Each structure stands twice: as C-alpha cells, then as structure tokens.
Image: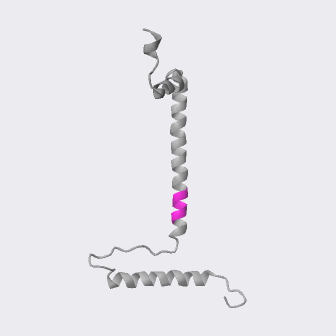
Amino acid sequence: MSSDEQTPRTWIGRLYKRWWADRPLADKKRINSLIVLVLYTFGFIYFVIYLSILNSVNRNKTGTTVKNWFGGDPPELVRLREEQEKEIRDSFNLLRKPVSGGR
C-alpha cells in the first residue's frame, strides 16, 4: 500500500485523520466522555435558567383556561379567573407592610 492510498483526499478527511483517527483509544474515550459531560452540563444549566425565567414571568398569572370552539372562555371560567386574580391581589395587599405616606 502506498502512502497516497492512506492519505485522505478531502480536507475533512485529512482533518479527521490528524485530530481523531491517529489518537490512542484511551484519549478517544476520555474526549468522548468529556463531550457528553459538557453537553449535559450545558443542557442542565440552560434548563434551570429557562425555568427561572418562566417562573419570574408567570409568577402572578392565574393560569390560562381552555377556550371553547366559538370564541372566548365560558362565563363560569371568566368569573373563576377574576376571583382568583382578586384573591391574589388581596393577599399581596395584606402581606405588604404599611408605610407612612399612605402608599
């Protein structure tokens, strides 16, 4: 076998051979596990940040209701949602410390 047959023709093949194919098996296993660890870590951190943003954005919302086929929510659901919003507002007003100035 000549050296021309062993050398890949494309630049991707040459890059692959230089960076990956000539490495020992122990190095390949270590790099593979590092790649997986980095991906899982990135996914976990992204998920935690995403959930914290969702929680801060949707903190005071009482939830979305299922709309019926013809348009808006049924009147019972609208009334329940308004009651829940009123209860949440009242509970925050009760928890706030009274300050001078009547705010």
Q: Residue furthest bottom?
A: 102
- Residue at 61 percent across and 81 percent down: it is 95
Q: Residue furthest left?
A: 69
Residue located at (51% from left, 44% from top): 40
Pick the front one: 78 or 22? 22
| First to last magenta residue range | 49-54
Question: Which residue is nearer to you in this view: 47 or 76?
Answer: 47
- Taking the magenta stretch, the answer to whether it contains residue 50 is yes
- Magenta highlight: main SS: helix
- Coloration of the structure image: one colour
Q: Quadrant of the C terminus?
A: bottom right
Residue at far right of view: 100
> Is residue 85 on the magenta stretch?
no
The residue at the point 34 percent across, 84 percent down is: 76
Q: Is residue 8 left or right of residue 72?
A: right
The percent position of residue 10, horizontal first and vertical second, equals 45, 26
Quarter of the image with the N terminus is: top left
The percent coordinates of residue 39 (x first, y second) are 51, 43
Query: Could you say which is closer to the camera, residue 6 or residue 78?
Result: 6
Residue 82 sits in quarter? bottom left
